[in-house]
Image (cartoon, grey):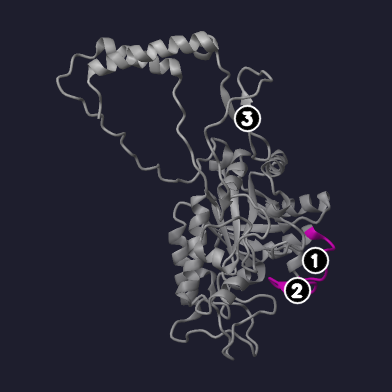
Amino acid sequence: MRRPVKYKTRQAARNRLIMIITAAILGAGVIGGASAAILLSRDDDGIEGIGTASGSDSTPPAITETVGDTTDGETVGTESEPVSDVSDAVTEAQTEEVTEPPQTEPVVTEPPVQTEPPETTAPTQPDSQITDVATTKNYKGGYLDLAEYPTRNELKKAAEALKADGYTAVMVELKYDNGKLSYKSNVAEAKEFGANPSVAAQSLDDIVDILHGAGLYVTGRVCALRDDLAAKGNSDAALMNVAGFRYSDGASRWISVYSTEGQDYVLSLLSEMKQAGVDEIMLRDYALPADAGTTAPKYDNSVSKTDAVRTFLDRVDKILSGAALNLELDAVTIAAGGDETMGIDCSDYGAIADSITADITLSNLRDGMTIGGKTIADVDADPAKTVETVLSALDASALNIRPLLELTGNAAKDAAQVAAAQNKGYGAYQMTERVISMTEK
């Protein structure tokens, strides 16, 4: 309840008397002295520090904000409201004494209105060339392994180096083929399955913010259904084999494309990635495995493989509305128009995906392979010739294709691969590491 003015007048006079006595004892500098402003700064590793506007070496005042420990991405602690300056309190009391008209009844002060915190939205992209990077125009993709850049400063320097080398985009692994993530997810199933990194990792929001800050378009690569952790952790999501056990390709179990629970888990991760501001999802292993031997995967005969895969991709496309979708396939499958065993039909992918990545990395091609009626005896002998031969077998006009090229460690050979792709009419390209492993390092 607010006090009557007469009471407040007496109280204000008493307060002024106390302030005068206090000033006489402690010195007028307590009230009127200039205090150094407290600044919160962030060093290159993202650690908060304290600085002063005066630049003096004196001990800074205590900070009212208290940060507690962090558990599973949630900060535990308290935050107190800053205390108003003493001189402001005196001025306020004086103003009320002079200007406020007499009140016959006590005035009730309404409690402050509690407002809901603003909704979390995807980080705003800088006004750089990011918005000009389309799937077939200006997309020059570099590659960064997030495990090699665990701090903000290291990732920032690596991103800026890519930009300086002429890249307009960057691909980062977000979900590996064993089910592990390169960032700390808040999806409940990811925590349950043990998918979060076993070592310290930055938040996805921070990762995207740093990459955008360098002026790079962000492509997140995701192994969708090849997921040992999820298949092991949830039998209802797992792809089974004809013998009735969880299917394995020899290295990893798979999520079944027929499982609604399995699909929902992947979609939850994709939604999280989109909300963090990832510009494009590069999806691979989104169908059935190619193994058709005695341990072949079991599937629902009432629904065709291609229909099951198409249903999943339609759901992916819907959840990513506002972010681009790229589907990664090997060049042989694209040249053949699909793969019935895996449930892949490329004929309608143009209506689903914004672009197609054609994997023509030298490590994934084999010596003596034949494509488009031409045989490549030694894929490593002349990388540029290999790229030219493979791309000649693909119909670039039918699909929005982006070649996935391999960094060999030889700058001249790498540049020759890019030149070969551009000579065949491919304006966009994506580089990746040699013998890349989708398994967490």
Cα distance between the residues tagged 1 and 3: 57 Å
Can you tell which mark lies on residue 369?
A: 2
Disc 3 marks a residue whose amino acid type is: Ile
Image vertical order of residue 205 relative to residue 94, above or below: below
Label 1–label 3 contact, CB within 8 A: no
Image spot of residue 281 (x, y percent) = 55, 57
Disc 2 marks a residue whose amino acid type is: Met
Cα distance between the residues tagged 1 and 2: 9 Å
The answer to which quarter of the image holds residue 129 is: top right
| Residue that numbered label 3 is attached to | 50
Can you tell which mark lies on residue 379?
A: 1
Image vertical order of residue 283 relative to residue 370, above or below: above
Sequence-first disc among 1 and 2: 2
**The N terminus sits in image quarter:** top left
The answer to which quarter of the image holds residue 51 is: top right
The answer to which quarter of the image holds residue 166 is: top right
Report crowding for label 3: few under 14, some 14 to 19, many 20 or more residues within 10 A (C-alpha). Answer: few
Image spot of residue 102 (x, y percent) = 18, 14
